[in-house]
Image: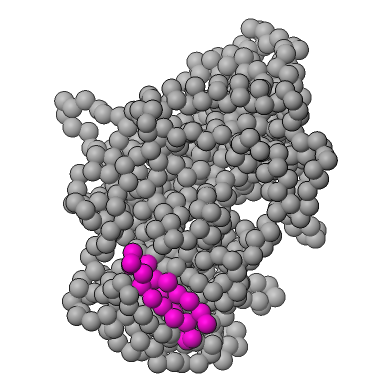
């Protein structure tokens, strides 16, 4: 039995297949020990999974909160301060009091080693046994929990890195080596990426061992089987728990990547090629743009202000979610997030929190039904919410608690609208040409407001939106990414060189996939190139084809507004994406686990209630989504509640249920 579990900041979502049906289950996350929620979810399904596919935020949270391991960095002598020098980027240009974030490795544990390899891979200063012993002693004195190794130009010749790694592994420490993690040029990004990996290895290793014990408790006399747990990686595919424990840097966008894969699958079923995915959960919102159904990736990611240059889906995240806390800055302006109430203590309406959140604002405005949350299994406390928010509204001179709640939603919407503009307008895409695919537990609550602000005329809310990230993980293939830096001009000899490099990477990829159990017929290889005009600082990644030069000019014009066909082009990196195709469940009707209230009612419309729209209270029909059949049409205003989410249909909007039970929302 394959089961997918996505651990979020507020909820842990579980999806699995029973017979021909998809079943979903949501439980509250347990931030202090995420494996507890996984155990609870597995018990709730009543199945014994053969294989767990897991999306996790453990590494991400540790990096954001700086709770990783005590690490040492070994690098070429003279380059010990690369992490401090960084790039001359100033994200807050006019902030005169900006504080430089501390590097993951303090100066005392950044150790230089006397060796040198040239840019072409030729050894300029040989690494001696004496120097190796000296550095080994220095690392032992530093008493790190893990070590990162990044030597100059090791992507061209990794021999010295291999020798250093062998020497330091003798100390019994986990060692992260740059030519294994990121065999590409750009010293700062490569050093930062391998440092992040080392920073997370001890923590994620312990966590994944705990997950394996939860999924398959050890039995006396039984031989331990391997390969039972796979982890979603940032690039949109899964890797084994063993690889994830050794290279946790590849899992930093684990959950959001699952959402993008799920959104693509359901958009394809609906016949949509150009979509903007909008995933609003309890802690954050993740947005991405899919053109022609392709998953866009980037190698210029950043998490917590630290560059992470491994391949990841091109996702833009902001700290706005259902649990985002409303607060006032020193000037008295209303702010929302990035701090979140999470699962503990949670929003006010959960019964434990005391600070107003986005979820509380929706409850005050009538957009959430207190009796229908999680299909009626969890009652929201509207009285407590009003009692705690009323004094804040009065103290800040709001006309009413509803006015305060509307302000919270307006600020959150503004943050999310800017995020969507970053991945669309700022990259040469008109959002009006796209369909907004809204999911996550809170996505449907905000989708129509965002679509109206961006000029988007159609919104698709898929089936089981609150668990789509877990579904995407269940639908994901095994993916391995390979790369090599070339830095060669596109000339008459370039194609032959590219073919040689691609064949070398393909041989390695096929062998790796065979070891994972994938026969040649289940292997898919995709060639990619990083290209730029000679003299540029950054490049564009495009599929390799016979006409890749023309494709580059077109892509450059689309992204930057101009192209220069007379200018020389340079191949920076060759890339290979290797996919092991896994069996996919049929996307039929899902049974929303535990939706007792929805099953007890015979009609889709369960009540008519006042809901606030544009500052006034409007009598609104409320529906149970599980009872809306294909072909059903509604006119706003309406509130559609379901087990995993709620969708708001404002006045003037129309809704229809398509053949796959997606809700298609359209504005006039």
Is residue 399 something one can see in this rendering? yes
Q: Which residues are magenta?
A: 647-668
Most distant residue in the top direction: 129
Instruction: State the residue at coordinates (70%, 53%).
Output: 559
Is residue 323 something one can see in this rendering? no
Most distant residue in the front direction: 546
Apparent side of residue 647 relative to residue 406 in the rendered image (left or right)? left
Instruction: State the residue at coordinates (64%, 26%).
Output: 498
Residue 369 lies in magenta, yes or no?
no
Apparent side of residue 311 relative to residue 84 in the rendered image (left or right)? left
Q: Position of residue 465 (x, y in %)?
A: 39, 63
In this rendering, the answer to whether 213 lies above or below 442 is above
Q: Position of residue 429 (x, y in %)?
A: 65, 60
Quadrant, the N terminus: top left
Residue 656 lies in magenta, yes or no?
yes
In this rendering, the answer to whether 486 lies above or below 35 is above
So how many labels did they put on this image? 0
| Quadrant of residue 136 within the rendered picture | top right
Q: Position of residue 613 (x, y in %)?
A: 49, 87
Instruction: State the residue at coordinates (55%, 44%).
Output: 312
Q: Nearer the viewer, residue 582 or 194?
A: 582
Q: Nearer the viewer, residue 388 or 75?
A: 75
Q: Position of residue 171 (x, y in %)?
A: 50, 18
Instruction: State the residue at coordinates (45%, 55%).
Output: 264
Q: Nearer the viewer, residue 189 or 537?
A: 537
């Amino acid at each position: 039995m394959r089961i997918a579990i996505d651990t979020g900041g507020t909820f842990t979502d579980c999806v699995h297949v029973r017979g021909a049906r998809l079943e979903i289950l949501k439980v509250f996350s347990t931030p202090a020990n995420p494996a507890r929620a996984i155990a609870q979810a597995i018990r709730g399904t009543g199945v014994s999974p053969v294989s767990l596919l897991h999306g996790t935020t453990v590494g991400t949270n540790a990096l954001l909160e700086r709770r990783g391991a005590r690490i040492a960095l070994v690098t070429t002598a003279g380059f010990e301060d690369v992490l401090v020098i960084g790039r001359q980027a100033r994200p807050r240009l006019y902030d005169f009091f900006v504080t430089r974030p501390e590097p993951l490795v303090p100066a005392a544990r950044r150790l230089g080693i006397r060796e040198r390899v040239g840019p072409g891979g030729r050894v300029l200063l040989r690494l001696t046994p004496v120097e190796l012993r000296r550095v080994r002693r220095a690392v032992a004195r530093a008493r790190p929990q893990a070590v990162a190794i990044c030597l100059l130009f090791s992507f061209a010749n990794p021999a010295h890195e291999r020798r250093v790694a062998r020497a330091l592994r003798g100390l019994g420490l986990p060692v992260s080596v740059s030519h294994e993690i990121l065999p590409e040029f750009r010293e700062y990004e490569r050093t930062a990426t391998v440092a992040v990996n080392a920073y997370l290895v001890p923590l994620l290793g312990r966590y994944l061992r705990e997950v394996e014990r939860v999924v398959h408790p050890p039995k006396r006399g039984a031989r331990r089987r391997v390969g039972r747990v796979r982890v979603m990686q940032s690039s949109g595919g899964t890797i084994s728990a063993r690889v994830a424990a050794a290279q946790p840097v590849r899992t930093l966008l684990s959950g959001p990547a699952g959402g993008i894969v799920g959104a693509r699958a359901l958009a394809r079923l609906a016949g949509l090629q150009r979509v903007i995915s909008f995933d609003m959960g309890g802690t954050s919102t993740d947005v991405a743009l899919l053109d022609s159904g392709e998953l866009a990736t980037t190698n210029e990611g950043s998490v917590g202000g630290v560059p992470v240059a491994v391949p990841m889906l091109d996702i833009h995240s902001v700290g706005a979610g259902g649990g985002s806390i409303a607060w006032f800055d020193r000037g008295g302006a209303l702010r929302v997030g990035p701090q979140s109430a999470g699962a503990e203590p949670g929003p006010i309406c959960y019964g434990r929190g005391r600070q107003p959140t986005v979820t509380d604002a929706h409850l005050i405005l009538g957009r959430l039904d207190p009796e229908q949350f999680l299909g009626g299994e969890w009652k929201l406390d509207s009285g407590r919410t009003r009692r705690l928010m009323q004094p804040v509204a009065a103290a800040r001179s709001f006309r009413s608690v509803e006015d305060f709640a509307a302000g919270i939603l307006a600020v959150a919407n503004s943050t999310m609208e800017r995020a969507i503009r970053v991945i669309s307008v700022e990259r040469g895409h008109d959002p009006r040409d796209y369909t907004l695919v809204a999911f996550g537990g809170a996505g449907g609550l905000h989708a129509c407001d965002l679509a109206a602000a961006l000029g988007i005329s159609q919104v698709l809310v898929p089936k089981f939106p609150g668990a789509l990230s877990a579904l995407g993980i269940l639908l994901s293939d095994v993916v391995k990414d390979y790369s090599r830096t070339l830095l060669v001009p596109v000339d008459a000899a370039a194609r032959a060189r590219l073919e040689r490099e691609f064949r070398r990477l393909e041989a390695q990829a096929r062998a790796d996939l065979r070891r994972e159990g994938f026969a040649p017929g289940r292997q898919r290889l995709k060639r990619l190139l990083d290209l730029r005009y000679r003299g540029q600082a950054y490049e564009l990644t495009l599929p390799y084809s016979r006409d890749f030069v023309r494709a580059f000019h077109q892509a450059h014009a689309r992204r930057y507004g101009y192209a220069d066909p007379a200018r020389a082009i340079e191949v920076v990196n060759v890339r290979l994406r290797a996919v092991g195709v896994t069996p996919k469940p049929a996307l039929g009707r899902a049974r929303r686990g535990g939706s007792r209230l929805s099953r007890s009612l015979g009609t889709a419309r369960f009540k008519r209630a006042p809901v606030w729209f544009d500052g006034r209270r409007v009598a609104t029909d409320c529906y149970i989504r599980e009872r809306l059949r294909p072909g059903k049409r509604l006119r706003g205003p309406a509130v559609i509640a379901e087990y995993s989410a709620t969708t708001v249909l404002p006045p003037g909007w129309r809704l229809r249920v398509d053949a796959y039970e997606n809700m298609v929302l359209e504005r006039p």
